[in-house]
């Protein structure tokens, strides 16, 4: 990985292609998600070229996938890997925090199931505070998960505010400032909608 800081979520443009978070927008406006790229053999390139000439397709889509120039696909994959690495570097404890959430949920579920059975054997706990303990240790990760909660909202504006905060935290910017700004934008948006 390069030593320079990466700004997560920032779009880059190469030869008219816009690359952002593993998504490539082509000059024609189509968008494709690049999660992996396999270079074609010379024979495969020749076969594709022949098929494309016969079909008359200008911006080819084969099996539902847009064929990207290798340079563009490689850039998208490099950017995606760098962003994932930035999350690991700048949001320490994220996996530990996710495991704590899973543990707390499993404890509550086990308790609820044992209470429903009514056999006198109590398993799990009604209240488990593992998440809170881990969140104190990793406040950036807790902030990231809060932003992720907004991002997973079905409301597109709330989701976009969450994604923006996630990107800032992953880029190494102030987590508390990112969360304050996210919540401020959401309050402003909801109060403006209340008057519609």
Image (cartoon, helix red, strand yellow):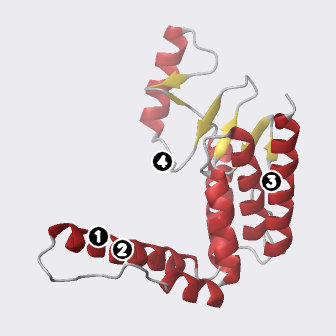
Query: How many angstroms separate mark 1 from mark 2 (CA)?
Result: 6 Å
Residue underneath mark 4: 38
Above/below status of 32 relative to 4: above
Secondary element under disc 2, as helix, strand or loop, is helix
Select label 4 or label 2 by which is in front: 2
Secondary structure state at the residue bearing disc 1:
helix
> Sequence-wise, which precedes: disc 1 or disc 4?
4
Q: Which residue is mark 1?
A: 112
Is 110 above or below relative to 83?
below
Residue that numbered label 3 is attached to: 10
Q: Which residue appears farthest toward the left when viewing the image?
A: 119
**Residue 86 in view in this figure:** no
Closest to the camera, between mark 3 and mark 4, is 3
Q: Earlier in the sequence, mark 3 or mark 1?
A: 3
Task: Please report contact status of discs 1 and 4: CB closer than 8 Å, yes or no.
Answer: no
- Residue sitting nearer the eye, 52 or 163: 163
Mark 4 or mark 3, which is nearer the start of the sequence?
3
* Residue at the spot 82% in from the left edge and 36% down from the top edge: 194
């Amino acid at each position: 990985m390069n030593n320079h800081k990466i700004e997560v979520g920032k779009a880059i443009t190469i030869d008219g292609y816009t690359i952002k978070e593993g998504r490539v927008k082509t000059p024609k406006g189509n968008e494709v998600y690049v999660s992996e790229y396999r270079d074609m053999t010379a024979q495969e390139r020749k076969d594709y070229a022949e098929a494309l000439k016969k079909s008359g397709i200008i911006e080819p889509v084969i099996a539902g996938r847009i064929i990207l120039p290798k340079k563009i696909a490689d850039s998208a994959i490099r950017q995606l890997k760098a962003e994932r690495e930035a999350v690991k570097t700048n949001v320490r404890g994220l996996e530990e925090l996710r495991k704590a959430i899973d543990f707390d949920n499993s404890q509550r579920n086990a308790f609820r199931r044992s209470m429903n059975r009514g056999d006198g054997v109590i398993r799990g706990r009604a209240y488990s505070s593992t998440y809170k303990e881990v969140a104190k240790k990793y406040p950036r990760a807790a902030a990231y998960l809060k932003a992720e909660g907004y991002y997973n909202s079905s409301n597109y504006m709330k989701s976009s505010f969450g994604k923006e905060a996630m990107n800032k935290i992953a880029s190494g910017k102030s987590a508390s400032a990112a969360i304050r700004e996210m919540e401020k934008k959401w309050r402003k948006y909801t109060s403006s909608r209340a008057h519609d």
